[in-house]
Amino acid sequence: MMQQYFEIKNQHEDYVLLYRLGDFYEMFFDDAERISKELDLTLTGRDCGQAERAPMCGVPYHSADSYIARLIAKGYKVAICEQTEDPATAKGLVRREVVRMITPGTIIEHTMLDEGRNNFIAGVYLDSRGAGLCFCDISTGEFHATELRGEDILGQLIAEIGRFAPRELVLSDGAYSLDALTAFARDKLECYIERGGEWRFIPESAQEAVSRQFGISDFAQSGLEDAPLLLQAAGGLLSYLHETQKQNLSHIRELSRYSQDAYMALDYTARRNLEITASLQSGDKKGSLLWVLDHTKTPMGARLLRQWLEKPLISVPRIRERQSAVAAMVAALPQREALERALSPLGDMERIMGRIVYGSANARDLLALSAVCAALPAIKEALSALDARYLRQLEGQMDLLADIGTRIGAALDPDDPPHTVREGGMIRLGFDPEVDRLRALLKGGTGRLADIEQRERARTGIPKLKVGYNRVFGYYLEAGRAHSHLIPEDYIRKQTLANAERYITQELKELEGEVLSAGDRLNALEYQLFTGLREQIALESHRVQRTAQAVAVADVLMGLAKAAARYGYICPEVDDSGAIDIREGRHPVVERVLEGSAFVPNDTTMDVQDNRVYIITGPNMAGKSTFMRQVALITLMAQCGSFVPAGSARIGVVDRIFTRVGASDDLFAGRSTFMVEMNEVADILRHATARSLLILDEIGRGTSTFDGMSIARAVLEHAADKRKLGAKTLFATHYHELCEMEGQIDGVKNYNVVVKKRGDDIIFIKKIVRGGTGDSFGIEVAKLAGVPDSVIRRAKEVLRDIESRTPGTLSALALPTAEDVPDDQLSLGTFAQGELMEQLRRLEPDTFTPIEALSLLYELSRKAKEM
C-alpha cells in the first residue's frame, strides 16, 4: 500500500495528496507533518516497512470539503486519491487513482465559493505579436476570451486581469517572464500563479482542444480565424483544466469572445479608488457601489451585477435597452414585486448545473433544480406583464424546463434527502419496482417471518413452533423436544437446548440472505438510478444555462429598478455628445452611509468645448473628492444601464475613467508616494483619449512646492489642450496659483467648495460653486483634526510672518531662523534645511556624469536660495 502511495505522490509532488483509506483521507510523511500544523490535526504514525513509522494524519472523507477549503485558502493545491474498485471484489490491493486536483481556480463545491462572485481561472499566452487571454469559471461554465494587440500589452493585460480578478493564472512561458504581471496578480489580487509551460499553448494542439470542447469545426465561420493568440490561450487553459479535473466539462460549451472596445476601460487603480465592488478602507462589499445597487434575489443575478459594474457599456443602443427595461419595472410596482417574489426562492441554477455535469451533485442539488423549474412559470408571467422589448426577449429566452422538473420530481423523494449519494433514501416510492421490493423487504421482513411461522405450525402440527434469530447462525425455527417426532425431514438441526431444538430451513436461509443484504443492494440500486438520472439531466445543460442567463439579467434589472425607486434615482439621458450635465447629483454610497442626514447635491456641467477642465479648490474634508467621485460613479452607473442619483442627468459616453486620488508608499516595490503618483499620472496621460474622464486629486503634492506646482500645471495644460488630449478633467488642488489658468487656457474653469468661517472655526457647506479660492483653511482643519493647541498657535505665527512678507512667491520668503524660534515650537525653515542636508547626504557623486552634476548643483543652489 505504501509503495502505491509513493508511486502516486511522485506524480503529484507539488500537491497535498489526500489518500483514501476506508472512511478517511490520509496524508503521510512531509504532507502529514506540514498539514497537521496547518489544520491542527493529530499527527500519528503507521508501520510502512521502513525502520521508522510513517508520520500520518487524516480527515473523514464525508467532511473533507471544509479541510480542503482551508488548504486552498492557505495557497495549497490538493490531489484527491480515491479507491477506484470495490474493496469487496478486489483481489489483493485495492486500486487507487487521483480522480481530481483542486486548485484555487478549479473549485466547484458551493461550500468553498462565494455565491455572489465568479471564481475565474485565467489562461494567458504571450508572444511578439501580442497576447491571448481567456477566463473560465468551471462552477458556472462561463468562458470568456479576447486578444490584445498594439502598444503597452503589459498594461492591457494587467487591466483585463484586474477586471476579472481570477483566483488562478495559467501562464505561458512568455507571460510568466513578465515580472510586473506576476507581481500584480500575486500582490494585488492574491492570485495563485501556475507556470503552464509552452507545450500547452502549441497552436495545433490548442486549436484541437478548442474545437473539441466547443464543437467548432470551422474557425472562419465561427469568427475565430483572425484570433490565433486567443485560440492558443483558450487551448492552453483547457489543457490544464482537463488534466486537473479528470471529469466531464461539457457544461463549458460556449466560447464568448469579447472586445475591450465594447466596454468602458477601468484599470485596477480606478476600480479601487471608486470603490466599485469593495470598500477602500475595509475591502468589504459594504461601503461600495455594489453594496448600494445589489438588490438581486438570485446568486446568478448577484454575479452578473458585479460583471456589469466591472464592464460598463460603450454602446448607446445597448445602454438604452437596459434603461428601458429598468424604467418599465420602476413604473410597474405590482409587476416588479411579483417578479421579485418569483425570483426569491431560486437556487443557483448555473452552479447546480455545473455540479450535475461534473458528477458531484447530490439529491438535494437535483431537488433544488426541480424547485427552480417549478418557479419559472411565475417568472415568465411576471416578465410578460412588463412593457419593454428587452424583457420580452428575456421571456422568450427562458425555457420552462417542465420536463426536467417532472423527471426529477418523479424519481426523487423530497422529504429529507441525504447529503451523500451512496447511503440511499433518495428514490421516491413507486418509481422503481425493485427499490420498492427491497425497501419493503427491509421494513416488512418481520411480516414474512410471521407468515413462515404460521405456515410451519400448520404444516408440522407443532402449536408453539416459533421463528427466532441469533448472530451465530441467523434465523431459526425452535420447537420443544416433546414434538421432535413431528419435525419434517427438510429441517436441519443447528442447536440443542435443555428443552428445545433449533432448526434451519432452506427458505429461512434465503430470506436471511435477502434481508441482511437488502440494505446494501438497495443503496447500490438507488445510487445507480440516481446517477442515471443525473446523467440524463446533464444532457440538458444548454437549456438550463440559457434559461439561467435570462433569469440573471431579469434579476439584475429588477434590482436596479428597486434601487432606483427606493433611493429616488432618475433615468439619465445617454448619448455620444461627450457632455456630462448633472443637476443635483449625489454620491450614491455616501448618501446611503449618511442616511438620516442631508446630503448636499451638486451640479456638474462638462463638455468637449468650453468646460473641459474643472480646477477645484477648497480645504481638505470640504467634499472635493466626494464630488469628483460622484461624477465618475454617476457616469459609470449610467453606462451600466442603471438610473442615477440626480435631479436630471445627461451623460455623453466616456471610453475610460482614470483616477489619481491618493497613494501610499509602495515600500515593497521600493517606490515612494511621489513615484507612485507620477507612475499613475504617466499611465493616465499615455492612455487617455478625448472621450475619457480624468479624476485627479492634488497632483504634485509629494514633492517640493514649486516642483509640484509646475508638474500640476503641465498636466492640466496637457489634459486641456485639444491638440494633445482635450479630455474632461476634474482637478482638485491646494495650489491656488493654478486658478490663474482660467482665461489663459481654453476650456479651464475654476470651482471651489463653499466654507463658512466663524472665528477660528469653519463649517463645511460642501457646495461646489464657480470661482477659485485663495484659502485652504489648513490650520482650521488641523484644529478640527485634534492637532495640539501649541502647534496650532505656532502655525498661526508662521502664517502671519509669511503673509507680512512679499506675497505671491515662496522664493522671496525669509522664514524665521532657528535662533528666533522657542525650543518648544516648530521651525519650517529648520525642516527645509534638514531636507536639503538629507538630500546631500544621499548623493553618490561617483555615479554622476558632468552634465548631471552641473544640473544637480543648480537645483541645490535654487533650493538653498528658497530657504
Image (tube, rainbow, N blue to C red):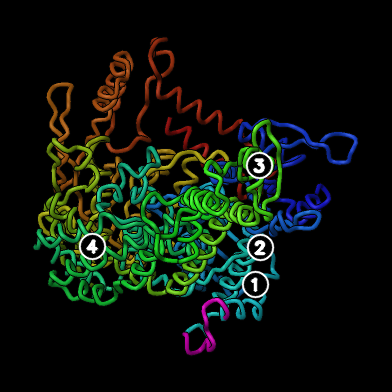
Residue 486 in sight in this render? yes
Cα gap from disc 1 to disc 4, whole angstroms? 39 Å
Q: Nearer the viewer, mark 1 or mark 3?
A: 3
Q: Are marks 3 and 4 in contact (CB under 8 Å)?
A: no
**Residue at position x 39%, y 57% in the image:** 413
Where residue 268 sits: x, y (%)? 43, 54
**Secondary structure beneath label 2:** loop
Disc 2 residue type (three-letter): Gly
Q: Quadrant of residue 551 in the image?
A: bottom left
Q: For this rendering, which residue is in front, 439 or 295?
A: 439
Cα gap from disc 3 to disc 2, whole angstroms? 71 Å
Mark 3 highlights which residue? 502
Mark 1 highlights which residue? 201
Mark 2 highlights which residue? 196
> Earlier along the polypeptide chain: callout 1 or callout 3?
1
**Residue at position x 52%, y 82% in the image:** 215
Where residue 66 sits: x, y (%)? 53, 42
> Earlier along the polypeptide chain: callout 3 or callout 2?
2
Q: Are marks 3 and 2 in contact (CB under 8 Å)?
A: no
Q: Nearer the viewer, mark 3 or mark 4?
A: 3
**Residue at position x 52%, y 52% in the image:** 458
Which numbered tag is attached to residue 557? Answer: 4
Cα gap from disc 3 to disc 4, whole angstroms? 76 Å
Q: Quadrant of residue 123 in the image?
A: bottom right
**Secondary structure beneath label 1:** helix
